[in-house]
Amino acid sequence: MKLKEAIEQLRNGLAGVAEPQEVQAMIRIICEDIFNYDQVDVALRQESELPDFAQERITDIISRLRRHEPLQYIVGSARFHGHRFKVTPAVLIPRPETEQLIDMIVDENPASDLRVLDMGTGSGCIAISLARALKFAQFDALDVSRDALAVARENAALLKVKVRFFESDMLSPQPPARYDIIVSNPPYVCWSERESMERNVLDYEPGQALFVPDNDPLLFYKAIAAYAAQSLERGGRLYLEINQRFGNEVKRLLEGNGFDEVRIIEDSYGKTRFAAAVK
């Protein structure tokens, strides 16, 4: 099978699964992650013969994508903040919007030797991306899922950063240490919002990392705010990704826990996405 034949099979097999522009992006990822061809290779090597496994692999990919399985789980990795992270169904797929959180933290914290905690680390994408960007910082990261921590540890090793990982529930974290920065992207999607979500998220991504009860949407933020109030150094900073519906409620919660300079911040799409505060 030649590369151009594989691309045509993918394009035909995925017609109707996604918009043409998204299909083209999928094809680019498949060519890069499965066949190790970047965009230049794809343009120049249309007549190249692919390995023997190509036909079976492409057929399998098309079948799984038509069942709405996320492509990142199929290829086993996701791009985030310029790095490739291993992902499995034990962890959420990193979202591009969260990259803005990384940039904000890096821009606002130029000092070196900071102590940072990532609560609910999942794949480790936040802690590891920050470890690659901040100067000589020390990193801790916790998650309640042992399987997620295994993925995060592998990502830290692959990207050659040092992070101490702990198995701990955000709702009852270990006794406070001292940190300059605490960051978290906790579960914040209400159960009632499930109906508006895509099947590739509902059917495949870990629900415990996504959902909170409708009657307690700030469940995790309450625990994080209380812990951060004890653990942050004076002048330390707290950064959160939040549900756009509850920006005002998160702001009042943080102010009620003694935080100053509380900001509710929109993402690049104009949606309320982040909260930041200073102890």
Image (tube, grey):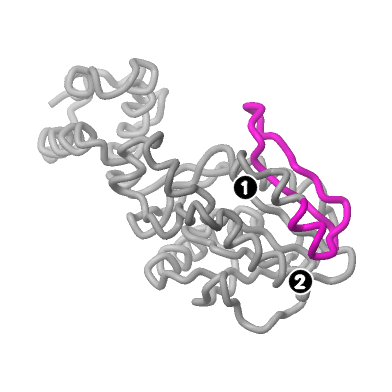
Q: Which residue is mark 2?
A: 179
Residue 106 place in picture, x, y as percent: 75, 49
Residue 199 place in picture, x, y as percent: 30, 38
Dividing the image into 4 quarters, which one contains the C terminus?
bottom right
Residue 7 place in picture, x, y as percent: 24, 21
Dot 2 lies on which element? Answer: strand
Q: Badge 2 local density, few (<14 within 10 Å), some, or many (20+)?
A: many
Q: Which residue is mark 1?
A: 242
Query: Can you tell which of label 2 and label 1 is closer to the viewer?
Result: 1
Confirm whether the magenta stretch covers residue 277.
yes
Residue 92 place in picture, x, y as percent: 43, 52
User: Could you say which is closer to the camera, residue 256 or residue 271?
Assistant: 256
Which residue reaches farthest bottom? 175
Question: Which stretch appears magenta?
Answer: 252-279
Pointers 2 and 1 in contact (C-beta within 8 Å): no
* Earlier sequence position, callout 2 versus callout 1: 2
Q: Is residue 141 left or right of residue 214?
A: right
Dot 1 lies on which element? Answer: loop
Dividing the image into 4 quarters, which one contains the N terminus?
top left
Real-space Cα separation, disc 2 to disc 1, in angstroms = 21 Å
User: Could you say which is closer to the camera, residue 167 or residue 58?
Assistant: 167
> Label 2 sits on what residue type?
Tyr
In the figure, residue 37 lies in which quadrant?
A: top left
User: Could you say which is closer to the camera, residue 241 or residue 114?
Assistant: 241
Confirm whether the magenta stretch covers residue 246.
no
The structure residue drawn at horizontal position 64% and vertical position 55%, both measured from the top left corner, is 132
Residue 84 visible in the displayed image: no
The structure residue drawn at horizontal position 55% and vertical position 58%, both measured from the top left corner, is 216
In the figure, residue 17 lies in which quadrant?
A: top left
